[in-house]
Amino acid sequence: MPRTTPEPEPLSHVARPVTIIKAPRLSARLGLDIIIASETFQLTGSFKFRAAYNLAAKVKEKMLITASSGNFGQALSYACALLGKECLVVMPDNSASVKIEAVREFGGTVFLVDTRLKSRAQATAELSEQHPQAYVASAYDDPLVIEGNASLGRELAAMTPAPEVIVSPIGGGGLSSGIISGLTSAGCLNRPHVTGAEPAIANDAARSLKAQVIVENESEPQTIADGARTLSLGKNNWQILKEGLAGIVEVPEHHIEGAVRLLFNLANLKAEPTGALSLGAVLTSPGLFAGRRICCVVSGGNVDLKLLKRILLPDG
């Protein structure tokens, strides 16, 4: 029986608004003024739904193919289910099991790949050759992805009191470029600075900003922040980030884990390591943020429970 495609609802009618969390205990512990903007309660558990729904609703193709460590795969699978479309997702075979299961539960078809033998890009290209009628959706390097994520930037622009600096996790750059685009389109007269937070062992974005050209990783860096295991920034994102980012903090792995623990213990928030990068940046360079009103974007909460237990109870 052929699929029927319902008329898409606007993204603003489907996505949940960002959750703003005041965290007085966290602020007191760190001696800083911190507000959390959490996307952990977004549909499919991360900001990726904004981008995925916007893209799936606006392309004409009935089948979409993507590569994802998990969050975009979940988001695109659910968006396609809402829109009566089909979704194929290439995932590393070491992706968090909770993310693999979620992609399937949202209706996506998973293709696991050993990235030591074959890159996600190569596996995606092979799948695209088998399905030439499909749209290949980048998780971060697509104007429709940036446009969807800009909705978060516009919501942050409406915060009162306005933050002076927004700290955003950065992997491929889709979130940060979207936030910058949204803040710009909202016409903020005193636009907050946007600072990226990137794993130190996956620091291609920081190296790119210093060199003023895109610098690629030789292979997928195996940071605990799996959403930042990207080879490079996207070309569309780079055009925005090279001018719009105030800087990038390179976060060591122990500060990523420390941020997960602090968010859980002092803000009652379950964050995945990639989502905790923003607070990890504050832990890494507290002097950079001293005396400023800080908004930490926690981009998602899809963390494997075994990993979460290991982080929360390191001596257990």
Image (tube, grey):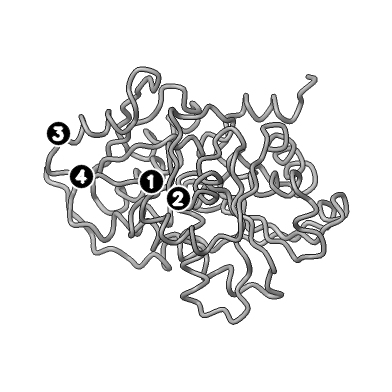
Picture coordinates of residue 134 (x, y %)? 18, 44
Q: Residues within 10 Å of mark 3 (few under 14, many from 20)?
A: few
Q: Which quadrant holds residue 254?
A: top right
Secondary element under disc 1, as helix, strand or loop, is loop
Front position in the image: 8 or 258: 258
Check the picture and name the quadrant holding the N terminus.
top left
- Which residue was labeled with disc 2? 48
- Which residue was labeled with disc 3? 129
Residue 139 is tagged as 1
Front position in the image: 88 or 140: 140
Front position in the image: 136 or 109: 136
Q: Is residue 114 above or below residue 187?
A: above
Between the C-alphas of marks 3 and 1, the distance is 19 Å
**For the residues carrying marks 1 and 4, which lies nearer the camera in this image?**
1
Residue 127 is tagged as none
Q: Are marks 2 and 1 in contact (CB under 8 Å)?
A: yes
**For the residues carrying marks 4 and 3, which lies nearer the camera in this image?**
3
First in residue order: circle 4 vs circle 3 = 4
Secondary element under disc 2, as helix, strand or loop, is helix
First in residue order: circle 2 vs circle 1 = 2
First in residue order: circle 3 vs circle 1 = 3
Identify the residue at image location x=51%, y=62%.
179
- Which residue was labeled with disc 4? 63
Q: What amino acid is labelled 4 in the image?
A: Met
Q: What amino acid is labelled 1 in the image?
A: Ala
Identify the residue at image location x=43%, y=68%.
12
Identify the residue at image location x=29%, y=46%.
137
Between the C-alphas of marks 2 and 1, the distance is 8 Å
